[in-house]
Image: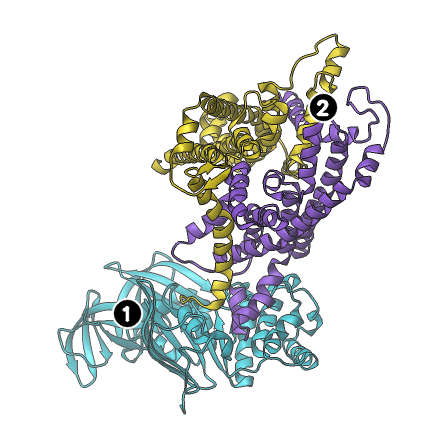
Chain colours: A cyan, B purple, C yellow
Amino acid sequence: MTEPLVTFERVEKRFDDFVAVKGATLDIGAGEFVAIMGPSGCGKTTTLRMLAGLDAPTSGTIRIAGQVMNDVPAHERDTPMVWQSLALFPFLNARENVEFGLKMRGVGVSERRQRAMTWLDRMEIAEFAERNVETLSGGQRQRVALARALVTEPKLLLLDEPLSALDAHLVIRMQSVLSRLQRELGITFVYVTHSQSEAFAMADRVVIMSQGEIAQVGTPREVYRAPRSRFVAEFVGRNNILPGEVVASHQGMVSVQTPLGTFNVQGDAAPGTSASIVVAADMMQVGGGENRLTATVISEEFVGSMVTAFLEASDGTELKVQVQERALADLGLETGREVSLGWNTADGHLLVDETP
Amino acid sequence: MTTFLRIYLLALFGFVFLPIVVSLLFSFNSDRFPTLPMSGFTTIWYETIFADPDFWRAARNSLIVSSCTAVIATFLGFCTAYTDYRYTFRGKSLFLAIILLPPTIPLIIIALAMLAWFAPVGMSGQVWSIIAAHTVLTAPFAMAIIRLRLNQIDESLEAAAWNLGASEWRAMREVILPFTRPAILSSLFLTAAVSFDEFTVAWFVSGLNKTLPVHVLEIVQGTIDPQVNAIGTLVFGISITLVVISQLLIFFRLQREAA
Amino acid sequence: MRRLNAYALTFRLPIIIWQALFFIGPLIFVVAMSFFVVKNYRMVETFELTSWAKMISRDYVWSAYRYTLVMAGSAAAIASILAFPAAWFLAFRCSARARQVALLLLIVPFFTSYLVRTFSWYTILAEAGVLNGGFALFGLGPFKMLNTPFGTLVGYLTLVLPLVMILQTVTMANIDTRLVQAARNLGCTPARTIWSVILPAGKTGFVIAALFAFILSFGDFVAPFYLGGSNPPTMPILIIDTTKAGQQWPRAAVVAVMMMLTLFSIAFAAIVYSYRKRASR
């Protein structure tokens, strides 16, 4: 990564007694698609609003393209945002909404009209240019909001849960629209969401926040395969977490004793350390693997051609296995049946518990 | 039971509307003393008031007072409504109380207060002092109407304007004002109508610059004069037109939004 | 954004200055004025209890005070009772559309001159007026209705009845109809339902409606003056008489302060009463 476009340096934001964001340090590169995710109230929207200048950091420094932004008012930044509510101006038509940012920058009437139309065309909604935005469908309004934010050709686009109001099938469509746009324009997207699937489908890197702090930053794959904390492992979901204690350590390999047995995993930790083994649901095998345990099938959940089976081990630990739907019958994953589960040592991930 | 209640309801409406209807009918009755059966149709009372220079002076004063009141009260109401919508600060409830309180104080007390307050500075008897008093009385209505409209705004709308490069002032002009426009117009008409009818305060502080209701009050004090019915009918016509216009503005706006 | 800037102040200061100059200032001045004295037809700004002593030692002030209290109280009670069946009917037995039309009609009187409506009542209630003309057809009357407490009450009701009907209707229309249905389902008679469900549920609304009726009647001078014949006078009429005729502004101020104190205590008591039970529930 060359010079980052955005840097957060120990940024903190307080509202009275409530600390919304604490000690956030983060670099976002030019042209990167970064998703900030976390449960509601984790500080992800405040982080985005600070980038837009809508909230001022209490301490720390935010830089955009090297310039300290802390005291730059919102309207003097070029950080357009796509809002959760879309925030389209109801008294303007679609074209006038798109023109708004250009008008504020003093662009002449004919030029801004032409540029707005170019963007409406690019978003495939030129035919609705003169329509009142309140008469447009959800997907069309979404595109107007995108065109409005992008018409000034910013280097950085902020998106605050922009797809949360859309139907499921439209979400998938808009995800591909957004990914393509970001690739074509080559600008930085900072995308706030609580949806793991949205973040993982589009982002180059994800930032996971919890209670105002950044819990982990990494590619979707890193975060998924190698969660750095129990919170991340649980938040990312579809992970099996087996807590226990390290009983042996040898040449980058440790043995962890859990109530369900002692298993090997790659990593490094002193014996006596409390640690967990994390195994992604799609790495679990039925009737195979180097580490084995048995569990009873409780229920199944179908998502497209994939099935997640929920199982319960003898001590009550909940386990998940993700398999292809057509393989379901062959594997004998029927509710109430006891099956043998396993995973290869290389697919497990060691999670050493943080000392409190 | 239902039939009985329906008749009862009609009777109450009858009580409420009887004086309005009687006033309207007798403004066209030729007999000076209103008795049943009515004596005959005439427009003489209207001709009398139209020929009366006092009436025109009072009407002109009323027009000045109600239009100035409408503009100032709507401005003040807008400022308060916007402050309430946008900001939280210590003493906010006190701030809201001082604008919302006046309608709960009897007009006669406000009238005396205004008279005594203005007299030493020589403002008593001026049209301006009626306007000052009327703005205090009507600003709460303006505030209520505009605040209700601001309740419907998407809270991100103003921030979206800043985000797209509008300063606070520019966002006010480009977003808040267009959004509240129907309520502002509606408030202008409503406050004008209320001011147009107010007579207690106007009577106390107007001096020689009588408004129309004060003119009526002085006629009524003299004798039974059907001129009052004619003026009342005219004033009613004007007030109700203003109110209907203000309601239509809201109605059509809502229709457009619903479409 | 916490810091106060020119923009925020632009929307906050005008109203503060305006209300201070034309509302708070005048009201405080009235209180102060009740301690002024009049010497040689001129008001002297001082702090003496002369006007207070003079006013509260006079029987006619106290009889006016009692009369105004009783009349305004009666108007509030009568308006509340008269309005209730109609409001109940509008709230529970009418379509939303009919209710809207009725509410709209009830707003109309606020935009007709109260003065003209009072004058109209004058011609209706007069001895040779419309109503007695009607009675005469049946060989009744004439009844003396003008210049009596009855005339005053008619005037007060003209002023407050539409408002009380509106407030009561809105109050009852906002009561959860499931409450009412549940009560009926549990075997409540309609009368019991009103007493034990509707009145408690809408208590705040009913109290506020009555309070407004009281405040408006208490401060009105038109009805007692034109329809009641100023006999006996009410507090507002005392204010007018002492100001307009006698030049005795400090005495008028005493009456005004007495009225304000009365209204504040009654309003406070009413609001405490209507919210108390709800808070402890």
Q: Chain of mark 2?
A: C
Q: Are marks 1 and 2 on the same chain?
A: no
Q: Position of residue B140 (x, y in %)?
A: 54, 48
Q: Nearer the viewer, residue A204 or A285?
A: A204
Classify residue A68 by image quadrant: bottom left
Q: Which residue is mark 1?
A: A230
Q: Which residue is mark 2?
A: C123
Q: Nearer the viewer, residue B181 or B134?
A: B134
Q: Nearer the viewer, residue A122 or A308?
A: A122
Q: Position of residue A181 (x, y in %)?
A: 56, 80
Image-based side of C116 in relation to A218, left or right: right
**Crowdedness of circle 1 by 10 Å Cα count: few (<14), some, many (20+)?**
some
| Residue C179, above or below A334 | above
Looking at the rendered structure, the kind of residue marked 2 is Thr
Classify residue A125 by image quadrant: bottom right
* Residue at x 26%, y 58% (from the top left corner): A316
